[in-house]
Amino acid sequence: MQPDSSKNLKTVFFVSDRTGLTAEIYGRSLLSQFPGVAFDSRPYPFVDSEEKARALAREIALVEQSSGYAPVVFSTLVEPQVQRIIAATNACVIDLFSTFIDPLERCLGQESAHTRGLLHSTFGTRTYQDRLNAIDFVLTHDDGLRPDQYSDADIVLVGVSRCGKTPTSLYLAMNYFIRAANYPLTENEFHREALPPQLQSVKSKLVALTIDPRALSHIREQRRPGSDYATFEVCQREVRDAERIFRQAGLPVFNTTATSIEEIAGWIMKEKSLSKPVAR
């Protein structure tokens, strides 16, 4: 049974003084343990000043006032004063930075630098650049963009709209430096009942994602309430037609329903025999 979104929808802020990918990845991983709650996700990257923090605090207060519920905030803010402004709100603030830094300081017997952007200097400029290159590749090849460059991809995810292709691609890029493209199947492919030509040429790199139609309908309803795109009938037809194409093409298929991004990414890495990054 799907959750009643009108009663259980909770607003979640992912706040960071950098890109916010870490806050979002860990936050979504924790939220996946609460399948009975629907979430309205709001990423807020580059909150790197007290002025920006105060503006965000005002928005958090407005959300609480309009909904009657305290929103959830996942934060990886480093500057203590900026974090204190967010922590002073009535939101449920999960400070991911201090959660791990404080016990590490006790364990290592040393205070942390409390400085933004140290990841690349700690683990090597090349490793940091590899991650940035992979993320850039995902963003420039998202949702069917630049299929002429799919030969440069490590993998290409294919599936219906909103089945988890983009967040999985970003997770693979950030954690494994995988250059992932993703391609959404549309009515054109369903009518042809075959993979499009631009995917035929990279068939060995394809990984198919599928999803339960009712779960898909719920996800789409959050994005486009009341649209034909979100109806169960449309979702059921698209999933059925997509799975038929996957079977005909002999593609490996993974069902993303109620599955964490980490699990999906791990299965893809194993299925395609992709190696994890080596520390340099």
Image (cartoon, rainbow, N blue to C red):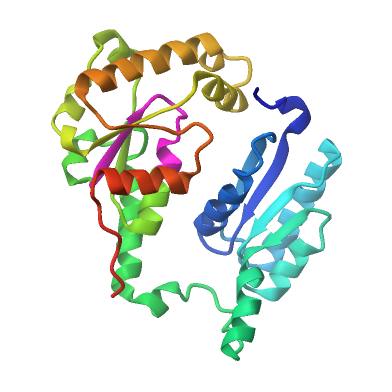
**Which of the pair 125/247 is nearer the observer?**
247
Q: How far across and down, in percent of the image, does residue 100 sit?
A: 61, 71
Residue under the image location 66 percent in, 38 percent down: 39
Question: Within the image, what quadrant is residue 121 found in?
Answer: bottom left
> Left or right: where does residue 234 sit relative to residue 17?
left
Residue under the image location 62 percent in, 44 percent down: 33
Looking at the rendered image, the quarter that the N terminus falls into is top right
> Left or right: where does residue 1 sit relative to residue 206?
right
Question: Within the image, what quadrant is residue 253 found in?
Answer: top left
**Which of the pair 115/232 is nearer the observer?**
232
Q: How far across and down, in percent of the image, does residue 270 sit?
A: 29, 48
Q: Residue furthest left?
A: 201
Q: How far across and down, in percent of the image, does residue 278 sit?
A: 28, 68
**Which of the pair 212/87 is nearer the observer?**
212
Q: Which residues are magenta?
A: 154-168
Is 57 magenta? The answer is no
How many numbered marks does the figure carry? 0
Question: Within the image, what quadrant is residue 68 found in?
Answer: top right
Residue under the image location 45 percent in, 43 percent down: 167
Looking at the rendered image, the quarter that the C terminus falls into is bottom left
Residue under the image location 71 percent in, 27 percent down: 5
> Left or right: where does residue 202 sit relative to residue 11?
left
Q: Is residue 22 visible?
A: yes
Q: Is residue 139 visible?
A: no
Image height of 245 relative to 280, above or below:
above
Image height of 190 relative to 258, above or below:
above
